[in-house]
Amino acid sequence: MGIHEAPTPQHWNYFLALEDDVVRISRYLELTTDNFESYSLELMRILSGAASEVDVVSKRLCQKANDKSKADNITKYKEEILAAYPQITSTVVEIPRFGLTLTPWDQWKTGANPLWWRAYTKVKHQRHTHFAEASLKHALNAVAGLFVLLLFYYREEGQNGQLNPDPVIFRVGIPFHVDRVAWGPPAIVYQLLSDGDDQSLGQPEGQTGTV
């Protein structure tokens, strides 16, 4: 009996694995701003895993926008991604179950790299003095940042309802409109709104967890 294997979105699957880690840790540490400065080895692992994947996906996103791209670090990624996908800085991620709203790429608006990325590099290279940077706040924003990148990288798949399975606790807000397909198996459709579209669609509500 033959087995057919179709292509799978590997980066999406890795994001879902990281999200599962966040769900698991939420059983022991409430995802609330009161706990944002809490840090641990497990949070360090989530932060490092998400930020490392951000590095990989950022490079691929740059190459998708420009097949001659030579970007190989976060500063160069920022220049090329903002030129091709300026909406990324305003993309909102919700965690409705815990009333949180994140904007993980907001600091790119000012030319600075995200605090969670800087925390990742400190923990990676100077863990003996910066272990406390492996905090809940930075881990959540890193996973949210990866989620956002993937929605731009897999834009066509998202529009066609092909990003399966769905995230469990993470939801995207503006500038994306999220809906369900009206045909076939249940799946989420991620529609990126243009500047002229109604930006109130998908507008999240919740406790601000932005850094």
Image (cartoon, rainbow, N blue to C red):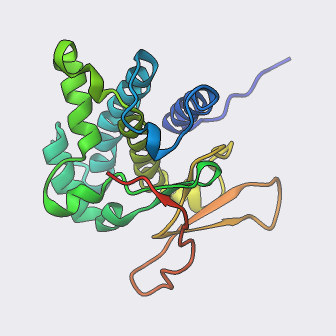
Tell which of 131 and 194 is nearer to you.
Answer: 131
Residue at (73, 54) in percent of width and height: 187
Q: Is residue 69 visible?
A: no
Tell which of 74 and 22 is nearer to you.
Answer: 22
Q: Quadrant of the N terminus?
A: top right
Image location of residue 182, percent across then percent down: 80, 68
Q: Is residue 71 visible?
A: yes
Residue at (19, 47) in percent of width and height: 113
Tell which of 58 and 68 is nearer to you.
Answer: 58
Image location of residue 63, percent across then percent down: 28, 47
Image location of residue 134, percent across then percent down: 33, 26
Left or right? Give the position of 22 relative to 185: left
Reply above or below: 155 against 28.
Answer: below
Image location of residue 144, percent across then percent down: 44, 46
Left or right? Give the position of 25 relative to 1: left
Left or right? Give the position of 172 relative to 78: right
Q: From this viewpoint, which residue is outermost toward the right? A: 1
Reply above or below: 46 against 196.
Answer: above
Residue at (54, 62) in percent of width and height: 206
Q: From this viewpoint, which residue is outermost toward the front? A: 34
Reply above or below: 7 against 109.
Answer: above
Residue at (37, 22) in percent of width and height: 44
Count of number-bearing discs: 0
